[in-house]
Amino acid sequence: MATFKFSGPSPYKLPQTYPEEDALHTEYVNNFTLNHASKRPFKPLVGAIFGLGRAGSIHLSNIINNHRLTLKYIVDDRPERFADLKKYWNLSDKVVLIPSSESNRVYNDKEVNVVFIGSPTWTHHDIVVNSIANDKDVFCEKPIAENIEETKKCYEAAKAKNRVLFSAFNRRFDPSYRALKDRVRKGEIGHVQILKVTSRDSPLPSIDYLKTSGGVFHDCLVHDFDMACWVLGELPIRVQASATALIPEIKAIDDFDTIGFMLTYPSGTIVLGDNSRFSPNGYDQRLEVFGNKGMIKVENERPFHSTDILIGQEGVKHSPIYYSFPSRYKLGYRNELEHFLDVVISGCPMDVTDYQTLAISKIATAAEKSARTGQSVELDWSRDGIPTNYS
Ligand SMILES: NC(=O)c1ccc[n+]([C@@H]2O[C@H](COP(=O)([O-])OP(=O)(O)OC[C@H]3O[C@@H](n4cnc5c(N)ncnc54)[C@H](O)[C@@H]3O)[C@@H](O)[C@H]2O)c1
């Protein structure tokens, strides 16, 4: 009885509120109440996807389930899988599956207005340039191209034709990272002094993939460099990295699997990162930001957040962390597609800009140079026309 006096009015007499962080609930409420105001008017887009490997399969599943898009072409160089693909996804006969030697059919098809690229990095430049030359907007897996020169050419082509070229930095669209960034930018933890990012890959990629990946700095660490600059809103002036290859097969192709790096920013902030190509305990993704007013962090997520197992005298056993990038960033991949469609359909400002992608490519090149030479690399942004404000 001692607490009965606190019971207050019936919940039926109170307004029902919920935290805005629960975007999935908002989506459900809009669907349930047929909230037309939540949907901008749109004309469904017609799309083509290049490359149906690890990344392409994630995008294909999101594309097929998106009501703002109709898929018309799948382009891939493993035609032996086409029959199974059609059956598995129950694709109608209107979806055309072709090898890359027939890519011109996509470029020349005026009905296609968006192209998704999930093919190997070395193929990106040509697909981007050809798609844009034929007036298509492009969603491209990172990195946009193998080097800064080709990346610049892709963006110049997009600018000349006034087309969208979106670089798929999926981590930015993860709800936890986005909330962290918003809170940091509101000043909740003050001036950031140290940002620590841990990024350990899983599952282990094939050596065939690694041979054409562009190296771990351009393939993996670009995500961490982007995350750091995106949270901080500035670009580093010094890059230091140390890297080793502890896995013989990775050493044999002159790449690295174990990396530590440090970025120094003009405002005095220091970023520390550690990366591994293979994390046997799952896809280890953590971020911690420490400022003069407090600290905020994103820990690993788990398929069963709420399950702790208590058996015998061993203590608490948590459920495992997400095993892979498709499982950990499922929402991020979905949200980045929605963002791209918002940009193309409604002209919303694009979240990943040309100069940001170019800046990340420059940081990745500098970090690799530092790892290979043992020297720190100073970055001068004044000559590239890249604004140092990363927002
Ligand atoms: N953002 C992320 O989380 C993420 C994760 C993995 C890979 N990626 C990026 O996605 C891209 C692909 O990587 P992946 O791991 O999916 O590779 P993958 O080797 O698993 O798949 C590549 C696919 O592309 C096909 N292909 C090859 N040449 C082609 C061409 N010219 N046109 C069309 N299809 C072609 C191959 O047949 C294969 O099916 C890379 O640029 C990589 O950096 C991004």
Image (cartoon, rainbow, N blue to C red):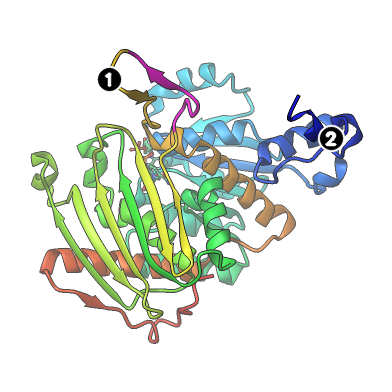
Q: Nearer the viewer, residue 187 or 95?
A: 187
Callout in the foreground (2, 1): 2
Residue occupying image coordinates x 26% and y 35%:
204
Q: Where on the image, by quarter, is ligand 1?
A: top left
Secondary structure under badge 1?
loop
Does mark 1 have its CB less than 8 Å from ligand 1? no
- Residue wearing tag 1: 314
Determine the residue located farthest toward the bottom in the rendered image.
382
Answer left or right for 198 relative to 134: left
Could you classify mark 1 by the number of other residues whose Cα lies within 10 Å: few (under 14), some (14-19), or many (20 or more)? few
Where residue 243 sits: x, y (%)? 16, 56
Secondary structure under badge 2?
loop
Answer left or right for 354 relative to 211: right
Q: Nearer the viewer, residue 43 or 243?
A: 243
Determine the residue located farthest toward the front in the rendered image.
2
Answer left or right for 12 relative to 297: right
Where residue 65 sits: x, y (%)? 63, 31
User: Quadrant location of residue 30?
Assistant: top right
Residue occupying image coordinates x 82% and y 48%:
41
At label 2, the amino acid type is Gly
Answer left or right for 310 relative to 278: right
Q: Nearer the viewer, residue 366 or 252?
A: 366
Magenta-tinted stretch: 302-311
| Disc ID at residue 8 | 2
- Tell me: residue 60, above or below residue 265: above
Where residue 251 sits: x, y (%)? 10, 47
